[in-house]
Image: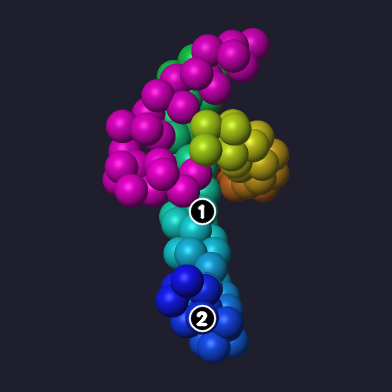
Amino acid sequence: MNVLKFIAANWDSILFVVAVVAALLVLYKHGRVEIVKKVLFSLVSRAEKEFGSGTGELKKATVIEWIYEKLPKIVTVFITPKEIEQLIESVLEYAKTKWAANGALQSYITNTPQI
């Protein structure tokens, strides 16, 4: 019963602390997602170079395997496998535009020397 009295007397402070902790977790996760996107861009490019076109499922599975090897374990607590797959899809779309716009990246992906 004392706990309920404490909560009733300090509900505004408790709510504030919970909101701050939630905000910190969101900021933490958002910061980590940006790092994950940068790592995924590198891994998606590497998979494209290694496996070429027409091997989408193989590339996706390989990138998922690689990302779990590279990520700190604490990050995997905050980012679910479903989120990883969604990130891969969004990074792949971004990567395709970068590959098309940058001749050096294109030659890296296709293993052709840039002239």
Q: Is residue 70 magenta?
A: yes
Q: Quadrant of residue 88?
A: top right
Residues drawn in magenta: 54-79
- Res 87 visible: yes
Residue 82 at x, y percent in the picture: 59, 32
Q: Is residue 69 magenta?
A: yes
Residue 49 at x, y percent in the picture: 47, 24
Which residue is drawn at the image coordinates 37% and 32% (left, top)?
Answer: 68
Whether residue 31 is situated above or below residue 100 in the rendered picture: below
Q: Measure the C-alpha gap from mark 1 to mark 2.
A: 40 Å
Instruction: Say whether residue 56 is left or right of residue 77.
Output: right
Whether residue 85 is situated above or below residue 53 in the rendered picture: below
Which residue is drawn at the image coordinates 47% and 71% (left, top)?
Answer: 1
Asked which secondary structure carries label 1, the reply is helix
Q: Give the amino acid at mark 1.
A: Val
Which residue, given by chain and number where applicable, does mark 1 sit on?
Answer: 33
Which residue, given by chain and number where applicable, does mark 2 sit on?
Answer: 5
Q: Quadrant of residue 103?
A: top right
